[in-house]
Image: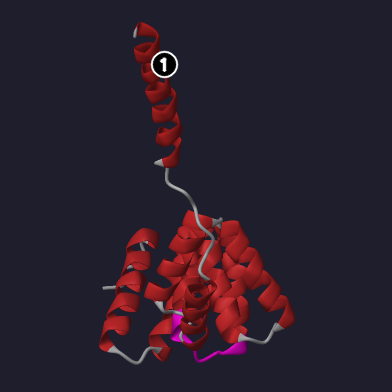
Amino acid sequence: MTFRLLGVATLLLVGGTALGDDWAVRRSDLDPKVVTRYKGMLARRPNDGYALARLVRLYRKHRSLALLIDEYRAAARSRPRDFGTQVVLGHLYRRAGKIVQAIDRYERAARLRPESAAAAAALGDLYRRQNKEVEAEAAYRRALSLSRTTREKVRHLRALAGIAVTTGDLKA
């Protein structure tokens, strides 16, 4: 009788640990349809924050941000004149903390589509982050001249005012 109880207890303990491993969170592969949908959204609107955030979250959860960056770098190599790919790659580098690479991609995007206020504003943000106030001011002025909405213009004016306060270049 005691052997049976001991055997059952051992079986429960061993089985419990085996079941404990089964309860762990498992990382499944990315759903290609979902990835394609988010990448398609970004191809149409490269500054779509929602699609970018969801795509980054998926890759961070199931793979890595570096893999997503590699995929977009390959796309940029095959389509070097694609504005959207350059912008998204700039966003990804920015999220990864690679400021120099992000600036390079945003500059490429600004050359491809000079009328893009978003690319100019992104450059201004990154230049300001690097304490390059002169370049940031020029980028924000360009973004201000290209902006269409009042909301964007107010954002760029605030950034320009912040630069003026930082540099002490306040004119009465």
User: Which residue is rendered at x = 33% and y = 65% of the image?
Assistant: 162
Of residues 67 and 23, the one nearer the viewer is 23
Q: Quadrant of residue 93?
A: bottom right
Farthest residue, direction top: 2
Is residue 50 something one can see in this rendering?
yes
Q: Secondary structure at mark 1?
A: helix
Q: Is residue 71 left or right of residue 139?
A: right
**Residue type for callout 1:** Gly
Q: Give the colour scheme shown.
A: secondary structure
Q: Quadrant of residue 156?
A: bottom left
User: Which residue is rendered at x = 43% and y = 77% of the image?
Assistant: 140
Is residue 130 something one can see in this rendering?
no
Residue 65 picture location, percent across and down: 55, 58
Q: Is residue 6 left or right of residue 65?
A: left
Vertical placement of 37 versus 102: above or below? below
Of residues 18 and 167, the one nearer the viewer is 18
Q: Quadrant of the N terminus?
A: top left
In this rendering, the count of numbered labels is 1
User: Which residue is rendered at x = 40% and y = 61% of the image?
Assistant: 167
Farthest residue, direction right: 78
Residue designated by label 1: 7
Residue stretch in magenta: 112-118
Q: How many C-alpha atoms fall within 10 Å of the one at disc 1: few (<14), some, or many (≥20)?
A: few
Q: Quadrant of residue 146?
A: bottom left
Residue 108 picture location, percent across and down: 63, 79
Vertical placement of 30 versus 38: above or below? above
User: Which residue is rendered at x = 32% and y = 63% of the image?
Assistant: 165
Residue 163 picture location, percent across and down: 38, 66
Residue 10 picture location, percent across and down: 41, 18
Q: Quadrant of the C terminus?
A: bottom left
Of residues 1 and 41, the one nearer the viewer is 1
